[in-house]
Amino acid sequence: MAVPYKAPVKDIVFGYEVIDSYNVLNKISEFSDFSEDIVIPTMEECAKFSEEVLAPINAIGDQQGASIENGNVTMPEEFVDAYKKFIEAGWASISLPEEIGGGGMPITLSGGTLEILSTANLAFGLAPGLSAGAISAINFHGNQEQKDKFLPKLVSGQWTGTMNLSEPQSGSDLGTITTKAEKQDDGTYKVTGTKVWITFGEHNMTENIIHLVLAKVPGSPEGTKGISMFIVPKVMVNDDGSLGDNNNVSCISIEEKLGIHASPTCVMEYDGSVGYLVGEENRGLNYMFTMMNEARVWVGGQGLACASGALQGASQYARDRVQGRPVGMSKEDAKKSTIIDHADVRRMLITIKSYVDAMRYLMYDNQLMLDLEYFAEGELKEFGEERCGILTPITKAWISDLGVELSSIAIQVYGGMGYVEETGVAQYLRDSRIAPIYEGTNGIQALDLMFRKLPLDNGQAMQRLLADVNKVIDEMNEGGEVLSDLAQKLKVEVDRLSEVTLWLGSKMLEGELVDASAGATPYLKMFGQVLGGYYMGKAAILATKKLEETGDEYYKEKITLSKFYIEQLLPLASGYASSVTAGKDDLFNIKAESF
Amino acid sequence: MNITVCAKQIPDPANETSYDNGIIVRPEEQVLDDTDRYGIEIALQLKEKYDAEVTIISMGPAGTMKGLQQALQMGADKALYVDDDSLKGANSLMTANVLSELAKTTNADIVIFGTESTDGYSGTVPQQVSRFLNLDCISYVKAIEIGEDVSLTRQTSEGSEKVKMPQNCVISVTAGGVEPRYPNFKDIMAAKSKPIEKVELSTLNITTDQNLEFISIEALENSKNGEKIIDEGEAFQVIVDKLKELKVI
Ligand SMILES: Cc1cc2nc3c(=O)[nH]c(=O)nc-3n(C[C@H](O)[C@H](O)[C@H](O)COP(=O)(O)OP(=O)(O)OC[C@H]3O[C@@H](n4cnc5c(N)ncnc54)[C@H](O)[C@@H]3O)c2cc1C
């Protein structure tokens, strides 16, 4: 039996302090009263809901999955019921603007709720998650009529939304899509084509589904410059809001896949379906970009969620499982001991636990920067935009990769019982594996970091981030022996990262782009590792202060987790440096057919 | 219509309960007794029908008032509480007296309870309150049907019976009868500005004595130790035989 999920509310609330969210958000007029009084009850109630409604059906979703018959996708009954409760409780819309029926809270607040909901049931959370993308698209770029017609029911969750980008020949490169949209006399378009991999493209939890579809209008420019975005409802919506005829949208099949079994991944066919153009023709991909940061941070959060869930199971199992006499323990004591008394098992658990903390701070901070970008003004807004640009590919890729790795370590803690399905931990590994793939593969994220973000403002943006890390190091140096010792270790890694960044910058200036691109993934990993150190340094400073104030052991453990991260995990960063600067030669000196 | 729900803040059941001289040690932060969520749910369903006001009343150390906040988050309109040192260890009659007086201050038409609190388990307060208020008591309600009239289904020793809800009464609700709602996010935010008011004990008309004496508290002994069956390959047979012996299979 899987261990019942208990959301780590105290850790989450601590995370909001580590990133200084209250002070930063209070500078924005809409959020001037954002405080712990909002965060704590929100997380507690979201935890209660997720623990009682979503987590208990996670395994059911995994085993039963979604099924298809005659084009109708059926969800496990429990999911239909849970979805109803979910929309009643309003968790889907807390960070949407009040004008459209949302909760009007900062995006930062949904860091914690997304973490909790996704840990409890990743597959379930994808339905409202994709709706959020469709809502933003319509809200940012749709006209008033479209907003009036589609937003209220999407925001309330009465309908769900999807994002239709991929086609069989167009994954990472959307320039090659062939779905076409032909303009009709009444101003609507006829959309025809096949989309693949469409998450929740069809299901029976709601009476309508609003698809956002990328397509090409005949005669539009080649490649990515000729892509437009359309709203294509599954069932037509009459002017009075009632439902009309079916819109020739069908789900042909759903995929059998490694994880997220309760999230139907659909092949969708549009056969002259009525589509409404969003914004202007040929601007579709630009519109996608405005929503991409939010979606990518969310996908990073999915890695955090899987690792955090897997840790709960593993630590409970380690406290229960009796096996082997720990080194240095008497025979008598060993009778009462469990595997958590073995140093190696502890190493696995603390590795997961300290990464989970570091990942959480990064993800929440990335969302804080999104809030600055969207809601602040002037310099603060510019800062948010710049920082968000750099953090997003790292949040997406570093965290989602770790989600897989740490879920795998959690299985190792169980031994054989982790490999069998009964304990539930294997599901986290399978579910986590999608996050490095969708929303732009992690390879694409690494290229984004290197070719788009590193050169921002002639490299100054990157320098400003590294300067912020150095500021935290200065602060740690002032904070007593333990902190200053950690500061020195962090310094070594930041300096190494700065050197490597300069090397990459000069390669790019010299036009040696292939050499630079060869190092993209190790560079992103190195960067993530160092940023982890930066946040764990901040956490250690805060925990030291809190420990003095309260004497609560909890903060002592937080310091230990930071210490472990900085001393034992952070040094991996330097290890990546030689791969970053190795260039392309070895990679291409093996013939394609020799692999 | 005024509906009053008696709700109790209790130490989080997820933590171990500690006692001091037989009295539960109450931390600053207590939570809403889950049992009370059923009563609140019924009150909220009635609120929708009658456009009623729902007031939470509570007796006990207020602390951070988290439990009361949780009741307001579900959708109740306001809360009143009495927190007085002299009530420490109050017996159920005293509790009923205080709650009845509080209910009077809200002009309650209907007073709703959970069946018994998760930390006290006396299960007699609703009936006592109905006597103080001179109202009918409909106990052990397990379902509610709201149509033109409201009918309540109560659990009885023989099975169940359906009664029409009068305009004025005391109701006690069993756990599992209705499904308490999860607070909506907007209600969670709205709860922060709903009134929670302290009522001084001295302003209430208390007519009973604290006539309960606490003698001691002892841990319950396991009445019977289980039998250990060592599996040497044949344990299943032993278990099957035992179950047959008990006529379970
Ligand atoms: C479960 C699931 C759900 C999905 N949900 C949706 C959805 O709701 N809507 C939607 O539109 N799509 C969805 N997708 C599609 C997903 O976004 C794509 O799978 C993803 O973009 C990668 O595209 P691809 O699979 O065609 O891989 P490819 O693009 O063929 O990539 C294959 C490999 O090549 C690498 N690669 C490709 N191009 C480059 C390059 N230029 N430089 C370096 N490396 C490169 C990639 O990193 C990857 O490792 C989903 C996919 C899955 C599996």
Image (tube, coloured by chain):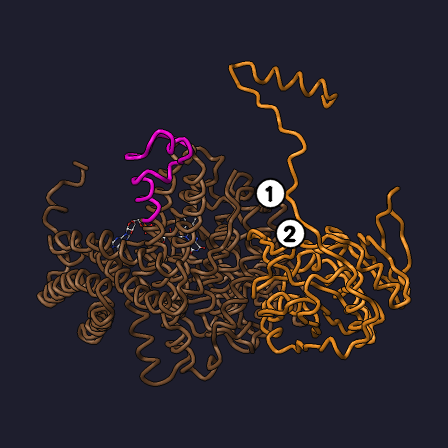
Q: CA distance from mark 2 to mark 1?
A: 23 Å
Residue A253: in sight, yes or no? no
**Which chain's colour is brown?**
A
Residue linked to disc 2: A81
Q: Which secondary structure, mark 1? A: loop
Q: How many marks?
A: 2
- Quadrant assignment, res B124: bottom right
**Circles 2 and 1: CB atoms closer than 8 Å:** no
The kind of residue on which mark 1 rests is Asn
- Quadrant assignment, res A288: bottom left
**Magenta segment: does it hold A324?**
yes
* Residue occupying the point 44% across, 33% down: A420
* Residue range corresponding to the magenta coloring: A322-350
Residue linked to disc 1: A70
The x, y position of residue A493, in whole percent, is 17, 60
Chain letter of disc 2 in the image: A
- As rendered, which of A358 and A457 lies closer to the eye? A358
The x, y position of residue A230, in whole percent, is 48, 66
Q: Which secondary structure, mark 2? A: helix
Q: In the rendered picture, chain B carries what hue?
A: orange
The kind of residue on which mark 2 rests is Asp
| Marks 2 and 1, the one that precedes in the sequence | 1
The x, y position of residue A221, in whole percent, is 33, 67
| Residue A130 falls left or right of residue B76 | left
Q: Alpha-carbon neighbours of circle 1 within 10 Å: few (<14), some, or many (≥20)? A: few
